[in-house]
Image (spheres, rainbow, N blue to C red):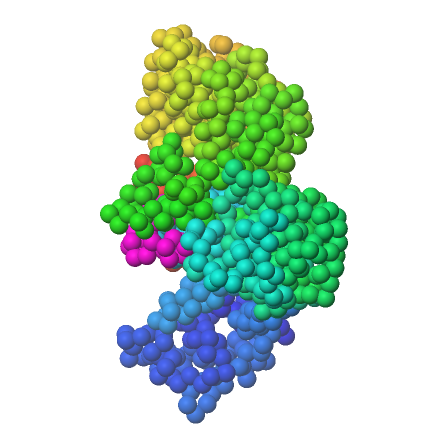
Amino acid sequence: MDLRFSILGPVEISIDGQVATLAPRHRGVLAYLLLNADRVCAIERLIEAVWGLDEPDTARAQIHASLTSIRRVLRAAEATHTIQTRAAGYVAHPGSNQFDLTEFTVHLAAAEHAADPLDAVAELRAGLALWRGDALGDLTAAYVVNARARLHEQRLAAIERLMDLELSLGRHRQLLDELIAKVAENPLRERLTGQLVLALYRADRQRDALAAARTLRTALVEEHGLDPGSAFSELEQAVLRGDPELLLPAKTRPQEPHPTLADPAPQPEPTPPPDAPAPPHLISASTPPEAPAASANFLPYDIPDFTGRAAELDRLGKLDEREPGGIVAIDGMAGVGKTALAIHSAHRLAARYPDGQLFIDLQAYAAERAAVTPAAALEILLRQLGVPADRIPLDEGDRSALWRSELTGRRIVAVLDNAADADHVRPLLPATTGSVFLITSRRRMIDLDGVHAVSMPVLPAGDAVGLFERIVGARATAEPVAALDVLQLCGFLPLAVRIAAARLLHRPQWSVGYMAERLRDERRRLVELATAERGVAAAFALSYGQLAPAHQRLFRLLGLHPGRDIDPAAAAALADFPHADHAELLLEELLDVHVVTQHEPGRYLLHDLLRAHATAMVAVDESDTAREAALSRLSDHYLHTARTAVDLLFPHSATDRRALPPAAGPITAVDGPGTAARWLHAERANLMAVIGHAADHDRPGFVRDAAVTLRPYLDGYFHHTDAARLHAVALVAGRRLGDRSGEARALADLGWTHWRRGEYADATRYSEHALTVARANGDRFEEARALNTLGNVRWRQRDTDAAREYFRSALWITREIGNRGGEAHVLGNLALVLGEDRGTEAREHLERALDLHRQVGNARGEALVLNKLGTLYRWCGRPDQAREHHRRALELYRSLGTHGDEAAAWNGLGHTARAGGDAAQAISEHATALERAVQTGNLPEEADAHEGLARAHLLCGQLDQAREHAESALRKYQALGLPEAESVRDLLTELS
């Protein structure tokens, strides 16, 4: 017989798949013995475990009765030996393949020792699949709380280990649903939330990642008065600044914070002894030095506060693991710390390369100085090697040949600093391996074959904090929040961090917070980040000055873009190019010289300080007319492309949108609904930024047209926060234009948006105002929309008489003006108000609504009605039809990609399953609804899911889970101001 013991969920003994019947007390004794498998448990210990300090007089007899019942079950499986009596008490001996906790532990151990991450993932998933709910089910014995907590911790640790492995394998998109559900179940779990934040960030959902981080931060403060730990805070800051390191699998990044590397602060050069060679940057053909020894060290000093860059240092330190020597091209934007990294690495490598440590500044980015030519550089390097002046030829080619000959058989480390490009350093490179050459440049050396490329990003948050604190000292540690503000305003750029820290160091009367306030003024930020000797703006100016005119123009025009990133099509519109290909070519070349960065293929962005520099340049080098024309072309590009995309996704409402004026520039071709949705998702933040800029710069016509264009997209994909912002500025725009129709539309849109967010007081206020304006203006279309929203509000508040009247008025208007789509929506709403009391009439309304939605091509409306039909069939006691209609609605929502609406379909399925007595199925479906609702911010469906879960768990006898979900449902309903709160209070009373 197949005997199994289970405690990872309800406590059970099953024989050949059939669960044996045991009373709760007997299951409590069995579970305790299983938790202590192979250890003798004295009867006194069993009594204390079951009752704690409330031991009844009959405790010993009850333990014996429990053991008798357990053995009776085991006797049927011919396994009485599993529970044995000892002189000191009782002991359980479940077989390793009979006990789910043992199997779980075996899988965890196998995962820990697996050499292949895929094998580890498989083991962990197999182990976690053994869980069927909360450990120890509904047991209430004294020992259960602590035991359940320990097992829950083991389960969470396994889940977190699994998530780490899956993330390291690049499966962040596949994990999102799973992680969202786990975080919803464990909202105070920092590591789990951190994994969700990372997965969202890697899935190009930075805003959602930051929202998840803020949710945890708020919950910790509210529940415990605590802030998240340093590791989570660093992750949050890295996401905030768009750190590209986070996009790498975890196994390829350093796991611990390391000190920070940055460009060295200028230091006075020490006075050399009389016989010392001149510094390398002073050596020239006209000032021949005495030849130094071949092992002379010409490296500049290694700055004492050098910290961090662990990943880069690790790569450089492993150069000669396979063969000695190598050429490394270190590239990055101005001020990112390339020289400091090269010098520090050269000092660390010096012991392994004893034949000389050489350095030359090729001055490609030096102000008011010409770059050192390859011929002059070869002379300097040859002299550093000790070659006499009279042996150095005049011809560059001959010098290069001599240089390579001199390097043969030597092991040196050489730093070629500030190279212009590959041609600048190619004559200086050795003919054979054996030496290390570290080249720094602001340009990627893509034309050099066989080099190790190290592209330096800005500092990780922890490294930036470490550098700042080392320079500023106690003031920085005393104001950690202000210090982080300073670092963020510096864009985590090492040069900027050092300058800000130096200014604080020499101004003891300044607080860190005061420094942050000075940096917040965008117009003066670059001025603040400068000293008499150096500055961020000066470093950027050198990079800018070396660009070709076409690249300079595109760079400075990027400073006009209100959004965060840009694609080639938008850049083409901004620069007035006829095609995106030309813009992409220029952007890629700007990328190669680290003037722009790239967070994903085809999307480019400026570092915050480079953006400030571009903004300064465009104000100087472009006329007011040119700037206005560029912004007009960019705005039109976004608006017209958005209109094309929205019309493809929502063709049924295209005729409701007024025609746009002709575009001032090119627009992106959108060839189908899939492309349309992807474009809108990618550009939503930019669209909102451009609209906000237009609102701030007195372009009310653009704002009005943008609101009309984006309304169905923002509503359909549950971007209700953006929608509320958009329609608020559209309301101001309509009033500025004296457009009463536009004012009524914006008010109606605000009413509907607040209804969708569950903010019923605001929904009522805006809708009633829309109704007044629409009636005064004779706008029947917006009048019907406002009435429909008011009906929905009253329906949610269970004022069915008022809801019915609003819907009937709206229905009469939609039919009068021939608005078939509006008629379909109102019919669907009116049907639910009629409900099961007038089921036949309600079903007729829904069938008519379904037909109308299909006529106008509104697939989302079709899904909405199918879901309502499912609800109606459930009310009428027809569960099979109910499930079928909810399922069809779910399939349609999935095809449309509207996850927020999916929550309603899943809740419908859950209610139907519970009505049919299938509590387990109901739990599964309501749990999925909860995930979708939380993911999209659908608060009413989130509350409904919690209530459904509470009632389903109650059916299963899982009282703790039922109480937890009921309490969550009550909080949600109270926040929404809905009458369902009263029925949930009754449920909690029943549970107590």
The image shows residue 350 at horizontal and vertical percentages of 58, 66
Pick the residue in front: 66 or 383. Answer: 383
Residue at screen point 58% across, 76% down: 96
The magenta stretch spans residue 793? no
Instruction: Point out the stretch of residues depicted in magenta.
Output: 464-485
Find out whether residue 478 is within the magenta segment: yes
- Residue at image point 57% right, 80% down: 79
Residue 914 appears at what percent x and percent y? 48, 47
Residue 431 in the image: x percent, y percent? 74, 57
Viewer-closest of 254 and 311: 311
Judging depth in this view, the residue of 618 and 210 nearest the camera is 618
Q: Residue at 36% across / 74% down in the picture? A: 50
For residue 746, what is the image quadrant? Answer: top left
- Residue 352 in view: yes
Principal secondary structure, stretch drawn in magenta: helix
Which image quadrant: the C terminus?
A: bottom left
Q: Point out residue 344 in the picture as x, y percentages from the top left corner.
A: 52, 59
Tell whether 401 sits left or right of 228. right
